[in-house]
Image (tube, rainbow, N blue to C red):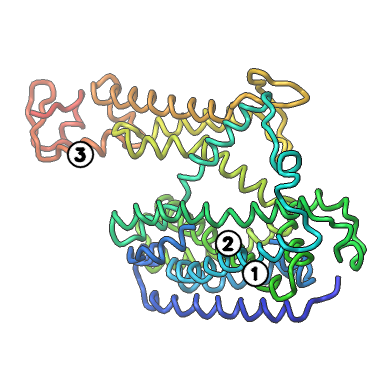
């Protein structure tokens, strides 16, 4: 494929702009020694920036860059400004990136729709790109519908934005408006898919100039957007669209890299290995993690066949495993580590037992209506989620009851779920153990029996 020099220059200019904005935003974290401020932008993200920050293969198709060079160059830019600025850089570059996506994609739609080689998308709408749901797969659609809704909630990327808001009201508004923004941003992508379906690819330069086969189009689903931009719009429009898609890729990449790095630094390094680590140490660990996660993400992007499959599978596991945990942590006061651990094991086991073709995992449990031809058509993912949720509630209530009633001694509370609760809530009260009164709960617990508050 011939290198498209004007397109390459356009992308370089776009990347420079993003890099400059990212480094400019990074000035806000200069000298910052509080890791939470770096992770959450000092909890000072306003509604405008928050809404914008809440909402791959293109370079190879349009410019002619190799697959590896396109991915590595994009990743390097995203990692570089995220490394120095944390959420500040991610949030402010998201504003520019989302504006580029909105303007770029909506600009491309009318040019592609009015191309002489594209039929009206309403002509074949009922037979080609809009079809009926086969009753056999109703359960699958229900599963996918619920999965994409509730599996999209317990994401670090989302809650990092929520926690960075100035006020609770701002957090609520940016959530609602951000959701509406995502819906609006999805419309041009749907229209471009319909345009590709109704295009006569045999008459485009894709076949007549570049000698590709039009029958390959259905097998290049991941390249549909850049193909439409390249062959069904004017050159200058395709360059604008290229900037839009590049912005979308970088917006997702920097957010994911930052969220994964923050979780590693805070939840794993500090909470498990170095409880007494200083804030400055946590910041440096987060920066090393940003680099490491960026490298892993780049390797994954180069090697995997479908990013969409990975994204969908990730939402799948989040729905089954994490959604019940989030629900109980917020609304169930007695939820504890014992319930969470059992729920995690049960949810993960039954989900894996249902099989996953994209990962080559065979079916171990055949849920109702299973067939070799259609696979799992029962909404088993939702069933796994409900099993996880039920087990979390039951085990949490059970362990809480057993410990507080003295049926199980507090020394068996290995996760300190009840011990810490008792010590923090009633440390100033008097306790009676075996008819003796104590002011010190730790002394009372050292004796046989469970302390009872007077």
Q: In this rendering, which labeled residue sits more in front, label 1 or label 3?
A: 1
> Which x, y percent locates residue 215?
88, 50
**Badge 2 or badge 3: first in the primary sequence:** 2
Task: Say which element carries label 1.
Answer: helix
> Which x, y percent locates residue 440?
12, 38
Quadrant housing the N terminus? bottom right
Q: Is residue 429 left or right of residue 266?
A: left
Task: Say which element carries label 3.
Answer: helix
Alpha-carbon neighbours of circle 3 within 10 Å: few (<14), some, or many (≥20)? some
Label drawn at residue 74: 1
Q: What residue is shown with label 3?
A: 423
Q: Nearer the viewer, residue 9 or 351?
A: 9
**Label 1, label 3: how far apart the Cα atoms are:** 51 Å
Alpha-carbon neighbours of circle 2 within 10 Å: few (<14), some, or many (≥20)? many
- Residue sitting at 48 percent across and 27 percent down? 386
- Residue sitting at 73 percent across and 77 percent down? 7
Q: What residue is shown with label 2?
A: 253
**Label 1, label 2: how far apart the Cα atoms are:** 9 Å
> Which x, y percent locates residue 55?
49, 57
Q: Is residue 38 above or below residue 437?
A: below
Q: Is residue 297 left or right of residue 4?
A: left
**Which quadrant of the view contains residue 65?**
bottom right
Q: Are marks 1 and 2 in contact (CB under 8 Å)?
A: yes
């Amino acid at each position: 494929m011939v290198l498209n020099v004007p397109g390459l220059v356009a992308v370089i200019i776009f990347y420079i702009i993003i890099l400059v904005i990212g480094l400019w935003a990074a000035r806000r974290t200069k000298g910052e020694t509080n890791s939470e401020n770096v992770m959450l932008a000092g909890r000072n993200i306003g509604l405008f920036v928050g809404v914008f920050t809440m909402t791959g293969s293109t370079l190879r198709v349009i410019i002619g860059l190799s697959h590896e060079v396109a991915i590595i160059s994009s990743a390097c830019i995203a990692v570089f400004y995220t490394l120095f600025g944390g959420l500040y850089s991610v949030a402010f570059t998201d504003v520019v990136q989302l504006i580029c996506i909105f303007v770029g994609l909506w600009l491309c739609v009318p040019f592609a729709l009015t191309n002489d080689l594209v039929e009206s998308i309403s002509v074949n709408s009922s037979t080609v790109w809009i079809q009926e749901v086969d009753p056999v797969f109703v359960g699958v659609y229900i599963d996918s519908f619920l999965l994409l809704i509730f599996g999209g909630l317990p994401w670090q990327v989302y809650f990092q934005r929520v926690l960075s808001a100035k006020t609770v009201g701002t957090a609520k508004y940016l959530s609602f408006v951000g959701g509406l923004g995502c819906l609006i941003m999805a419309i041009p992508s749907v229209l471009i898919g319909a345009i590709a379906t109704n295009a006569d690819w045999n008459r485009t330069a894709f076949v007549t100039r570049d000698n590709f086969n039009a029958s390959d189009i259905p097998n290049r689903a991941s390249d549909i957007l850049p193909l439409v931009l390249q062959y069904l719009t004017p050159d200058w429009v395709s360059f604008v669209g290229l900037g839009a898609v590049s912005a979308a890729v970088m917006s997702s990449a920097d957010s994911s890299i930052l969220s994964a790095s923050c979780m590693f630094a805070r939840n794993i390094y500090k909470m498990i290995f170095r409880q007494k680590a200083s804030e400055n140490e946590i910041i440096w660990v987060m920066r090393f993690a940003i680099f490491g996660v960026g490298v892993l993400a780049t390797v994954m992007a180069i090697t995997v066949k479908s990013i969409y499959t990975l994204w969908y599978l990730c939402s799948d596991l989040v729905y089954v495993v994490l959604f019940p945990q989030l629900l109980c942590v917020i609304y169930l006061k007695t939820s504890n580590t014992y319930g969470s651990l059992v729920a995690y094991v049960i949810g993960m086991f039954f989900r894996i037992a249902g099989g996953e073709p994209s990962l080559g995992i065979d079916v171990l449990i055949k849920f109702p209506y299973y067939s070799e031809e259609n696979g799992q058509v029962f909404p088993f993912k939702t069933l796994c989620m409900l099993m996880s949720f039920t087990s979390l509630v039951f085990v949490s209530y059970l362990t809480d009851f057993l410990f507080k009633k003295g049926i199980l001694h507090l020394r068996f509370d290995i996760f300190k779920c009840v011990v810490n609760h008792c010590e923090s809530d009633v440390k100033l009260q008097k306790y009676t153990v075996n008819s003796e009164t104590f002011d010190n709960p730790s002394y009372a617990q050292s004796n046989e029996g469970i302390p009872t508050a007077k």
